[in-house]
């Protein structure tokens, strides 16, 4: 296992990080890892969320403290929105590991989940309250993902949201990904099956809808979705209410999908500003009724 007293992490052009690393090297006896990302420096990052294990360059990794800065310098240089998104992806990926490990010292820990809502945080909290979650990995390591792909069918989606879920149809080609790396991490998860549940939580009320679709992601435009309004599962309501309360939500929609191996619905994510029109129509106005009751 690789380990360090302190890791300093960020963009390779961030001179602030180099100054801090110089201080650690010249004025302390701390074991330092300087982990920089950019065009001339790359690292294989693979976080197994269910087992809470991080692999850095394909070795299990741990450290006692982290100082991390999101990379602003590359975007300032290129003005390319993709560089801004990539920097945010890396920051969110490392934040996911920090969120799950409160013993690691980090400045401004509360900002790991604020002001943006971190999708990994909801999975970690769901585990805390005994809500089943899929096998989940945050990774840019083609070696690790190819090994997992041999054992199970995987889906993937962007760390920062905004993109639809896709099936990983085949292993990454070693001839194309010669360094064994994707440019930045993605969420990779075991593939679950329909039906899917969407459970609205509105001011203490629950509204549950069962969805079926031909597409892996029911939001795909050309894929009609069957929606059925049904009773909310009693075995999940208390746990889901605790999850919402810890995050500070009075309005949300949580998504679950069926696992044929364990015969249970597994939690995918919680949406803090979900669309509701299609569901309210099926429920004949009950979703809107709960929203107005909660507001009045």
Image (cartoon, helix red, strand yellow):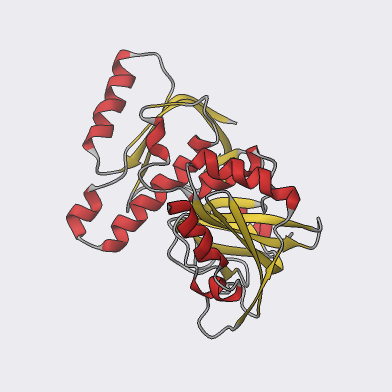
Image coords of residue 236 (percent x, y): 70, 49
User: Does 279 sit left or right of 135 as displayed?
Assistant: left
Residue 10 in view, yes or no: yes
Image coords of residue 16 (percent x, y): 23, 33
User: Does 19 sit left or right of 254 as displayed?
Assistant: left
Image coords of residue 68 (percent x, y): 36, 35
**Which residue is found at the position 67% from the left and 66% from the top?**
196
Residue 142 in view, yes or no: no
| Quarter in which the N terminus is drawn | top right
Q: Nearer the viewer, residue 198 or 56?
A: 198
**Which residue is found at the position 49% from the left and 73% from the top?**
277
**Which residue is found at the position 49% from the left and 26% from the top?**
104
Residue 28 sits in quarter: top left
Q: Nearer the viewer, residue 130 or 138?
A: 130
**Which residue is found at the position 54% from the left and 68% from the top?**
165
Residue 129 sits in quarter: top right
User: Does 222 sit left or right of 207 as displayed?
Assistant: left
Total numbered labels placed on residues in the image:
0
Image coords of residue 24 (percent x, y): 33, 20
User: Does 23 sit left or right of 280 as displayed?
Assistant: left
Q: Residue furthest bottom?
A: 222
235, above or below 168, in the image: above
Residue 192 sits in quarter: bottom right
165, above or below 214, in the image: above
């Amino acid at each position: 296992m690789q380990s360090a007293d302190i890791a300093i992490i960020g963009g390779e052009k961030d001179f602030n990080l180099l100054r801090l690393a110089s201080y650690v090297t010249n004025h302390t006896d701390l074991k330092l890892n300087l982990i920089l990302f950019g065009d001339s420096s790359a690292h294989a990052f693979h976080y197994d969320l269910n087992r809470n294990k991080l692999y850095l360059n394909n070795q299990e990794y741990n450290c006692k403290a982290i100082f991390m800065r999101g990379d602003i310098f590359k975007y300032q240089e290129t003005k390319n929105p993709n560089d801004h998104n990539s920097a945010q992806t890396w920051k969110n990926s490392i934040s996911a590991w920090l969120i799950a490990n409160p013993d690691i010292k980090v400045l401004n820990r509360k900002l790991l989940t604020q002001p943006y809502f971190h999708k990994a945080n909801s999975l970690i909290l769901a585990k805390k309250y005994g809500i089943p979650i899929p096998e989940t990995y945050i990774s840019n390591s083609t070696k690790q993902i190819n090994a997992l792909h041999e054992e199970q069918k995987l889906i993937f989606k962007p760390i920062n949201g905004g993109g639809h879920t896709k099936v990983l149809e085949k292993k990454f080609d070693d001839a194309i990904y010669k360094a064994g790396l994707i440019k930045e991490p993605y969420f990779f998860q075991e593939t679950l099956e329909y039906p899917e549940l969407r459970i609205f939580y509105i001011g203490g009320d629950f509204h549950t809808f069962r969805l079926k679709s031909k597409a892996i992601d029911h939001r795909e435009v050309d894929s009609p979705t069957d929606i059925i309004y049904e009773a909310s599962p009693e075995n999940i309501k208390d746990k889901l209410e605790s999850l919402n309360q810890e995050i500070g939500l009075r309005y949300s929609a949580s998504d679950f999908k069926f696992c044929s191996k364990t015969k249970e619905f597994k939690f995918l994510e919680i949406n803090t500003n979900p669309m509701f029109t299609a569901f309210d129509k099926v429920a004949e106005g009950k979703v809107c009724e709960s929203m107005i009751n909660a507001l009045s």
